[in-house]
Image: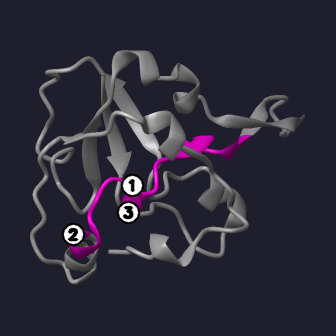
Amino acid sequence: MELLIKTSDNGVPGQTARDRRAYKQGMVVAAFPDGHTWGKEELNIKKFVIIRIPDAAWDPAWLVPEMSAVVALDNKPFITARRPKVIPLEEIFTTQELLDLKAEKTVSAAIREISDIKTKAQDYDYNSRPAEFGLDW
């Protein structure tokens, strides 16, 4: 299984509701079988990284947004978190690669292999994002 992971944040800082609906660093954006043909934007390391994991390690729930218990004016729940899990970039890149990304140097966009993904995936918490996630472009 190949996963498309965000390497940068989307959203509007300060607009909490709108920001919570946006993709954040480490969130799984899409999942495809091994060998998927990725597009130019998906191969842009400043936006995404692709990781390959064992099929048995994949949990489709990682693509399901968290929805509110309270409904909006249109009688529908609203997104409180775009994705419930993140893969910290520190689990994908080496320390030097992270420093190079911050300095906007070239880092290989090759597909990364992660066999123990379930131990690396973490619950996403908007209130306690670690400082290491500070790769804003």
Label 3 or label 2, whichever comes before in sequence order: 3
Residue 84 is drawn in which quadrant? top right
Residue 132 image label:
none
Determine the residue positioned at 55% across, 68% down: 12
Q: Is residue 16 above or below residue 14?
A: above
Label 2 or label 1, whichever comes before in sequence order: 1
8 with respect to 106 (left or right): right
Determine the residue positioned at 17% across, 41% down: 111
Q: Residues within 10 Å of mark 3 (few under 14, many from 20)?
A: many
Type of the residue with mark 1: Glu
Residue 91 image label:
1
Q: Is residue 86 above or below residue 71?
A: below
Per the rendered image, the range of residues in magenta is: 79-97
**In what element is the residue under mark 1?**
helix
Type of the residue with mark 3: Ser
Work out which quarter of the rendered image holds the N terminus and state it. Answer: top left
Q: Position of residue 24 (x, y in %)?
A: 49, 56
